[in-house]
Amino acid sequence: MEDIKNVVEWFEKNNEWDGYLITLLELLLGRRIGDNMVWEAVDNYLSHTEVDPMKHYNDYIFEYDPKTTWLKRDVNSIIYGNVEIWCDALQKDFSDKRKENITSAYKKQKQYETIGEYLHYVVEYNDVVKWQTDDYRKKLKKAVEAANIQYAVSSHSLRKSFGYWIHKTHPFDPDCLLSLQKLFNHTDLQTTMNYIGLTEEKNRQLINDHGEFIHNVLAGKGDEIVKNMPVISLKSDDFGRIIRMLTDDVDKYQAAINMANELRVI
């Protein structure tokens, strides 16, 4: 949690507001849903960039010079007869192998009639998107280094963090993983657990518990109660109904609820 805070603050302190908004959209949306915090992030972004969204309603959210150049170029004003002419006109330093691959891919597709259209709307567009993505990754790397984070962090880590912390903040919700599976469009729950790091975390915990058990055995404490007894997940309302079946005493009911909160396994 501290690492997330430090990374976001780096973008703020360095006036990297595009990176700030991209980071928070990744963390808050998981590219699927969001909440009021999203609007706070957008408002903060707009206040610092002084962008009027109504004046740029049909524009891309993030300005990027190569993309702006690409958008302004009239594809019909220049006739590109082949990849060589296109590379010369736009000063593209493509290898012969890439030129061959582009020509081959153009011949296989059916959407664009001329190679000029294909070069503009497919080849150059994909390059521009890649450059812009790489630009954000470089800024994220600076933020991670400034936060002194010692483990590997990528732009994809933000989406995984979205799932991990949603699960961590809803430990007693039996439908939480099912919801995350649907949000991530995964085929099964195990894929979701692997993706957001729950499987790895559980494996580490099992190994650590076993190490502690062996330590106790060697210390002559092998008869100690094993910590990880079976855990049953219940919705809080269901748990409350079970207690009410056992007693009508309000004080006892509240005491049982308080005890459950103290003993709950997170």
Image (cartoon, rainbow, N blue to C red):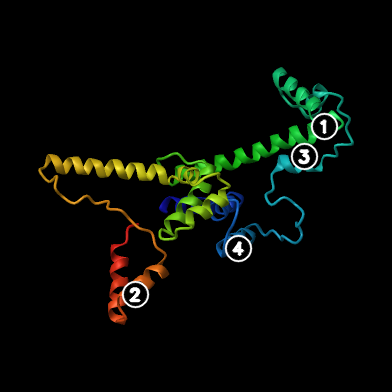
In terms of sequence position, does the residue under pointer 4 or pointer 1 come before the other?
4
In terms of sequence position, does the residue under pointer 4 or pointer 3 come before the other?
4
Q: CA distance from mark 1 to mark 2?
A: 68 Å
In terms of sequence position, does the residue under pointer 3 or pointer 2 come before the other?
3
- Residue annotated with mark 2: 245
Secondary element type, mark 3: helix
* Residue 228 in view, yes or no: yes
Q: Outermost residue, top direction?
A: 96
Pick whichever, 221 or 32, lies toward us: 221
In terms of sequence position, does the residue under pointer 3 or pointer 1 come before the other?
3
Residue depicted at 67% across the width and 49% down the height: 62
- Residue annotated with mark 3: 70
* Residue 149 in view, yes or no: no
Q: CA distance from mark 4 to mark 2?
A: 44 Å
Q: Horizontally, is 107 left or right of 224 in the view?
A: right
The kind of residue tagged 3 is Trp
Residue depicted at 88% across the width and 32% down the height: 78
Assess whether mark 1 and mark 4 are in contact (beta carbons under 8 angstroms): no
Residue 22 percent coordinates (x, y):
59, 50
Q: CA distance from mark 3 to mark 2?
A: 69 Å
Above/below status of 48 relative to 196: below
Query: Would you call the spot at circle 4 few (<14 residues within 10 Å), some (14-19), or many (20 or more)?
Result: few
- Residue annotated with mark 1: 110
Residue 123 percent coordinates (x, y):
74, 32
Query: Would you call the spot at circle 3 few (<14 residues within 10 Å), some (14-19), or many (20 or more)?
Result: some
Residue 191 percent coordinates (x, y):
49, 43
Secondary element type, mark 4: helix
The kind of residue tagged 1 is Lys
Mark 1 or mark 2, whichever is nearer to me? 2
- Residue annotated with mark 4: 39
Secondary element type, mark 1: loop
